[in-house]
Amino acid sequence: MTDRNTLADSFLATTDWARATRAPLAGDASNRRYERLTDPATGRSAVLMDAPPDKGEDVRPFTAIAGYLRDQGLSAPQIYAEDAEAGFLLLEDLGDALFARVLEANPTPERHLYEAATQVLITLFDAPLPDLPPYGPPLMAELSALAFRKYRMGITGDDGGAAVTRFLPRFEDILRQTTGGRQVVALRDYHAENLIWLPDRAGPARVGLLDFQDAMLGHPAYDLVSMLQDIRREVPAGIEIAMTELYVSATGLDDHAFRTAYAVLGAQRALRILGVFARLATDYGKPHYLDLIPAVWAHLRRDLEHPALAPVAELLLEALPAPTPEALDRLRPA
């Protein structure tokens, strides 16, 4: 079987970047791999995405959603070349100024950056809907059950089958009651590690967008929760309050209904991520994701205080073990 480096060389040979130097970039939780290409003659750079189809990756959703986002005036990377069959894209290099790194170096512009990122979501609220699958109550409830099937199972050796059986219909009913109505494109991984600051651009285009290939049609609160209940960096309460108010005011949504959906979707997202991070540690040998689980748990506990989640709150807190150091050690690969 031809190795990926040889295939990448063959792909780049069909472009203007065949002689570029290549350096690895930080990857993500998927099987995708990234390299920065630099043209030694001009100093220009681009990014190579290597997404192996034999490992379940498909570049076509990225291509389609990038085009949709650019059509809305947003800063998704331009695509310079594509080989969907082999799993390669050559992308515009949006740089390294991730929100998380920018604010780590200087927290002063924090509100400014988060306002720009909220404006991106306001732009998407008004955008036409593309043909994407729904991120609806049945799927969201099923993905939430990963907290039992991977997180609880990995710690206790028991997936809490009876508790899952009670949880699923209750939570799906909560989701159905609170997250219907207006739908938008939900990018589903919208946070400070996937947003790039582009101050030379204007308006919402100042926010470079990454990791949106899993976008679906969902509730308008979903990406706002993802950004403001960030697992990797603590967003100050004042920023969370102000950005929620900005979004509700700009979209004209009902404030009470939106805040209810925000809490419910925050809990859904936290439950799913508990399971995903546990699976990345136990099944894929990536224990560094365990370091993020206490933050996930903290957001879950807070969201479960909302009255809309009363039918599942006690069940979840009884069935799911708290992420103590001893519990997390049981998820570490041997």
Image (cartoon, rainbow, N blue to C red):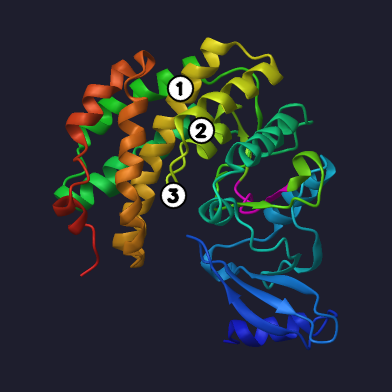
| Left/right of residue 287 with respect to residue 157 in the rendered view | right
Q: Which residue is mark 2?
A: 225
Q: CA distance from mark 3 to mark 2?
A: 13 Å
Corner quadrant of residue 146: top left
Location of residue 126 with respect to 107 vertically, above or below: above
Quarter of the picture containing the N terminus is bottom right
What residue range appears in magenta? 207-214
Residue type for callout 2: Val
Kindly state the secondary structure of the residue where label 2 is placed: helix
Corner quadrant of residue 35: bottom right
Kindly state the secondary structure of the residue where label 3 is placed: loop
Q: Earlier in the sequence, mark 3 or mark 2?
A: 2
Asked whether residue 95 is drawn in magenta, I would say no
Q: In the image, which is nearer the foreground, mark 3 or mark 2?
A: 3
| Left/right of residue 269 with respect to residue 252 in the rendered view | left
Residues at discs 2 and 1 in contact (Cβ within 8 Å): no
Between 73 and 176, the one nearer to me in the picture: 73
Q: Which residue is mark 3?
A: 232
Q: Residue at x 56, y 27 (%)?
A: 221
Q: Residue at x 76, y 81 (%)?
A: 12
Query: Picture coordinates of residue 53 (x, y %)?
Result: 60, 68
* Circle 1 Cα neighbour tier, 10 Å, few/some/many (<14 / 14–19 / ≥20): many
Give the label on residue 73, or none: none
Q: Residue at x 62, y 80 (%)?
A: 23
Kindly state the secondary structure of the residue where label 1 is placed: helix
Q: Is residue 321 visible?
A: yes
Residue type for callout 3: Arg
Q: In the image, which is nearer the foreground, mark 1 or mark 3?
A: 3
Give the label on residue 175, or none: 1
Q: Earlier in the sequence, mark 1 or mark 3?
A: 1
Q: CA distance from mark 2 to mark 1?
A: 15 Å
